[in-house]
Image (cartoon, rainbow, N blue to C red):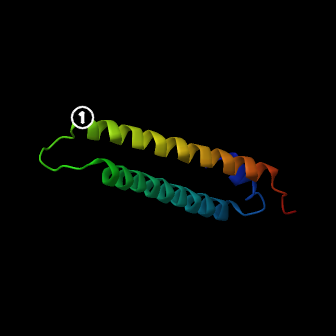
Amino acid sequence: MDASMMAGLDGLPEEDKATMASMIDQLQLRDSLRMYNSLVERCFVDCVDSFTRKSLQKQEETCVMRCAEKFLKHTMRVGMRFAELNQNAPTQD
């Protein structure tokens, strides 16, 4: 968990901080797995056409690589944009 998230927990007792940190870590893991599953499903549906072989055909492999690259670039860009917006948002004091 990053330091900016922990800063919001300063007024809590240590036990509550640990509980919140654990919950945040679990949510981040869940979101990461959800993103990964979404990537696999989307690229599989878009790229895999034939089930006649155990391995991917060359064009399917190329398609999967491009799909995954686009998905990850998009995800990174969205994350960066949210971070920018979060920095410019007024804080609640």
Q: Is residue 64 above or below residue 19?
A: above
Whole-percent x, y for residue 52 in the image? 12, 47
Left or right of 88? Residue 42 is left
User: Which residue appears at 74% of the width and 63% of the height?
Assistant: 12
Nearer-the-camera pick, 24 or 71: 71
Name the residue beneath numbered marker 1.
58
Q: Is residue 10 above or below residue 70?
A: below
Whole-percent x, y for residue 67 in the image? 41, 43
Nearer-the-camera pick, 34 or 2: 34
Left or right of 46? Residue 73 is right
Name the amino acid, label 1.
Lys
Q: Residues within 10 Å of mark 1 (few under 14, many from 20)?
A: few
Q: Is residue 55 above or below residue 50?
A: above
User: Which residue appears at 68% of the width and 51% of the height?
Assistant: 82
Q: Residue furthest left?
A: 52
* Label 1 element class: helix
Left or right of 10? Residue 21 is left
Nearer-the-camera pick, 23 or 56: 56
